[in-house]
């Protein structure tokens, strides 16, 4: 039991509280980096916006002048910020809830009582909490959405429990069931979109669903447990954040802050050394370990090494077994952006969302052939990590036995440590990656990093592996509270190429508070479109990039004028960015997909503070909403 209630904290805040990054100890390296840091900031500190931007200026993309001149590709009138408890969309658009926390997927389950929470009996048969990444699949004539439930708010799921802390195994099971993934058929009727109750596709995947490990870690000593001596049969998927979709019609769900589910009941237990890099600590916010021995690392030290993967799910078969694809590495996975390269090999881009962690790319050995065998494409291939140079070029560094001195199973399980060995670039929390469907380029939201460039007790801050977080061109601001979007262009227009060039598509900022300098943001940020902490990101089929935020919504101080979290659209060609939607107070806008006919856009609202969407007196419910044009024209 925690002595202070931390259930209200976001995952990032909780992680920061429990896993403060260590300071570095090598004094000489610190001095060397500090000097280069001053040199870089010296340019930024010269004052004028032109100079400030000029230091990264050749890396910045299109200008606002070009943007103004370009014919608008935006089919909406941009909206103002909001600070209230509901959603706003542009004139001529409307929104309605599609699926709320606790809605029944089967007629045998009843909807949640929004004031009492959910019963254990219903908890694995209803729409889970805190919706996140999602994808829509057309299967036969059906439209099927697979969607993540990243985490739960203990208090609203366990209203009887003091501060929401589980009091029994039954309480733990409720929390376990309300997370994971929902697969559900959806259909549009006279009253809008709704879940097709009892569809054969409907399914809940949660913290106890049987799944398989495949790839280099499968069968390794590192992942064997007493319950699974073969090291291939695992249970559950955890902290499912962003998502991805393969060309062969499967869903990729990404395990992010998996560390928070594994704790120790034994104060004497010495935590294995590899835990530190992933932030696995004795005390958790869910207390699973107190009632469910599988989550007690003092009894099952390998169990947390079976989480932190990309998991492949076949949405067309509710009885299929999800597969953890360990070749894609074990990190705090944000999403998995899949693209088929020119030669048919499958490329998956992935961010590791923690301060100072890295950006990854997987390239399959085999090629994708429509209708062919795809079972090994995500098992056999090469994992790379990104190194960004200050000159606007970069390199994907292969993680091999030769480059890391680690065996293949060790690289798959201790991926962060492997990436540190090859000298990857520490990033400002890589969130979603999105690949442009109409140009050979990819984007990653670097949401923020309050410790970038920070010196504490004379030492430069590092990630949990000791890699220093000095400012660099791709992560150019100290104490970066606004975030940026980096974009790269694979050499030879080939996503498998190990070389790339890059620029910053946008550097978020606040031009109302900072009249010039780097914190005002890049030239495509203005007082009418400003935001902070870009996180979710998806391209639509026309090549517009949609940006969702998960940031500071106080609308005060450094964030004055930025309002609630929001969704914006960006034009990759002109750099222009416009605000399309604002979420309810306290919420994050995350997850985006489209109906088969592209006349509906589905967006997720996670962790609203206010009684959204049911109104006053009701509990806040994480919800997927359907957004349409009043004239039913295309929206993506
Ligand atoms: Fe689950 Fe990094 O957001
Ligand atoms: Ca996210
Ligand atoms: Ca986030």
Image (tube, rainbow, N blue to C red):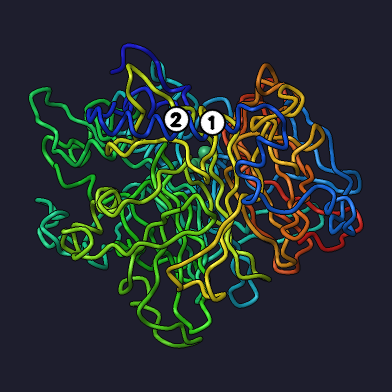
Per the model, the C-alpha gap separating discs 1 and 2 is 10 Å
- Split into 4 quadrants, where in the image is the C terminus? bottom right
Which circle, 1 or 2, is nearer the viewer? 1
Callouts 1 and 2 close, C-beta under 8 Å:
yes
Q: Which residue is mark 1?
A: 41
Q: Residue at x 16, y 58 (%)?
A: 406
Question: Would you identify the image quadrant in which residue 309 lies?
Answer: bottom left
Label 2 packing within 10 angstroms: few (<14), some (14-19), many (20+): many
Relative to 32, does residue 98 appear above or below in the rendering? below
Q: Residue 213 location, x and y as percent?
A: 26, 62
For the question of whether residue 613 can be seen, the reply is no
Ligand 3 closer than 8 Å to label 1 CB: no
Q: Nearer the viewer, residue 289 or 553?
A: 553
Q: Residue at x 34, y 33 (%)?
A: 32
Residue 98 relative to residue 319: left or right = right
Relative to 226, does residue 188 appear above or below in the rendering? below
Question: Would you identify the image quadrant in which residue 469 lies?
Answer: top left
Q: Residue at x 51, y 27 (%)?
A: 479
Residue 319 relative to residue 129: left or right = left
- Split into 4 quadrants, where in the image is the N terminus? top left
Q: Residue at x 44, y 79 (%)?
A: 345
Residue 256 relative to residue 233: left or right = right
For the question of whether residue 255 can be seen, the reply is yes
Question: Would you identify the image quadrant in which residue 617 lies?
Answer: top right
Q: Which residue is mark 2?
A: 453
Residue 362 relative to residue 60: left or right = left
Q: Residue 129 location, x and y as percent?
A: 51, 39
Mark seen at residue 65 = none
Q: Secondary structure at mark 2?
A: loop
Q: Residue 77 location, x and y as percent?
A: 89, 46
């Amino acid at each position: 039991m925690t002595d202070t209630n931390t259930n209200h904290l976001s995952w990032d805040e909780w992680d920061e509280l429990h896993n403060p990054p260590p300071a570095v100890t090598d004094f000489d390296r610190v001095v060397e980096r500090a000097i280069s840091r001053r040199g870089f900031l010296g340019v930024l500190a010269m004052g004028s916006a032109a100079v400030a931007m000029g230091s990264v200026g050749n890396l910045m993309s299109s200008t606002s002048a070009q943007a103004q001149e370009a014919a608008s590709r935006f089919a909406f009138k941009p909206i103002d910020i909001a600070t209230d408890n509901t959603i706003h969309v542009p004139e001529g658009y409307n929104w309605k809830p599609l699926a709320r926390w606790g809605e029944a997927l089967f007629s045998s389950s009843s909807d949640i009582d929004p004031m009492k929470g959910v019963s254990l009996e219903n908890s694995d048969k209803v729409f889970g909490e805190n919706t996140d990444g999602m994808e829509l699949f057309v299967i036969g004539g059906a439209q099927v959405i697979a969607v993540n439930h990243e985490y739960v708010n203990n208090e609203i799921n366990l209203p009887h429990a003091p501060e929401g802390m589980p009091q029994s195994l039954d309480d733990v099971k409720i929390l376990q069931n309300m997370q994971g993934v929902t697969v559900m058929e959806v259909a549009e009727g006279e009253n809008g979109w709704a879940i097709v109750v009892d569809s054969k596709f409907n399914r809940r995947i949660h913290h106890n669903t049987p799944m398989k490990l495949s790839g280099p870690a499968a069968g390794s000593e590192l992942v064997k447990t007493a319950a699974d001596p073969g090291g291939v049969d695992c249970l559950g998927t955890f902290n499912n954040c962003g998502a991805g979709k393969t060309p062969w019609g499967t869903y990729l769900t990404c395990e992010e802050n998996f560390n928070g589910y594994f704790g120790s009941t034994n104060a004497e237990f010495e935590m294995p050394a590899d835990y530190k890099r992933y932030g696995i600590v004795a005390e958790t916010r869910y207390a699973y370990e107190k009632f469910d021995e599988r989550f007690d690392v003092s009894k099952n030290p390998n169990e947390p090494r079976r989480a932190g993967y990309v998991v492949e799910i076949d949405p067309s078969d509710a009885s299929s077994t999800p597969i953890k694809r360990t070749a894609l590495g074990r990190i705090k996975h944000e999403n998995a952006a899949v693209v088929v390269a020119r030669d048919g090999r499958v490329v998956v881009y992935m961010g590791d969302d923690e301060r100072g962690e890295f950006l990854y790319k997987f390239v399959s050995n085999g090629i994708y052939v429509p209708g062919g065998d795809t079972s090994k494409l995500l098992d056999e291939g090469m994992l790379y990590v990104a190194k960004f140079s200050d000159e606007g070029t970069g390199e994907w560094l292969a993680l091999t036995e030769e480059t890391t001195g680690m065996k293949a199973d060790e690289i798959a399980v201790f991926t962060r440590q492997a990436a540190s060995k090859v000298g990857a670039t520490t990033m400002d929390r890589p969130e979603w990656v999105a690949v442009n469907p109409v140009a050979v380029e990819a984007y990653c939201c670097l949401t923020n990093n309050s410790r970038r460039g920070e010196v504490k007790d004379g030492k430069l801050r590092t990630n949990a592996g000791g890699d220093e977080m000095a400012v660099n061109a791709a992560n150019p601001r100290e104490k970066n509270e606004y975030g940026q979007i980096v974009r790269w262009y694979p050499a030879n227009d080939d996503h498998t190429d190990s070389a790339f060039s890059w620029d910053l598509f946008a550097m978020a900022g606040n031009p109302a508070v900072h009249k010039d300098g780097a914190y005002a943001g890049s030239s495509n940020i203005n007082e009418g479109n400003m935001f902070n902490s870009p996180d979710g990101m998806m391209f639509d089929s026309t090549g517009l990039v949609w940006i969702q935020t998960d940031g500071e919504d106080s609308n005060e101080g450094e964030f004055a004028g930025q309002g609630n979290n929001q969704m914006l659209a960006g034009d990759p060609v002109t750099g222009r960015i416009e605000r399309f939607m604002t979420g309810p107070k306290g919420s994050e806008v995350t997850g985006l997909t489209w109906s088969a006919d592209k006349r509906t856009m589905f967006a997720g609202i996670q962790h609203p503070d206010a009684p959204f969407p049911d109104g006053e007196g009701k509990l806040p419910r994480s919800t997927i909403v359907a957004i349409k044009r009043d004239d039913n024209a295309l929206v993506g």
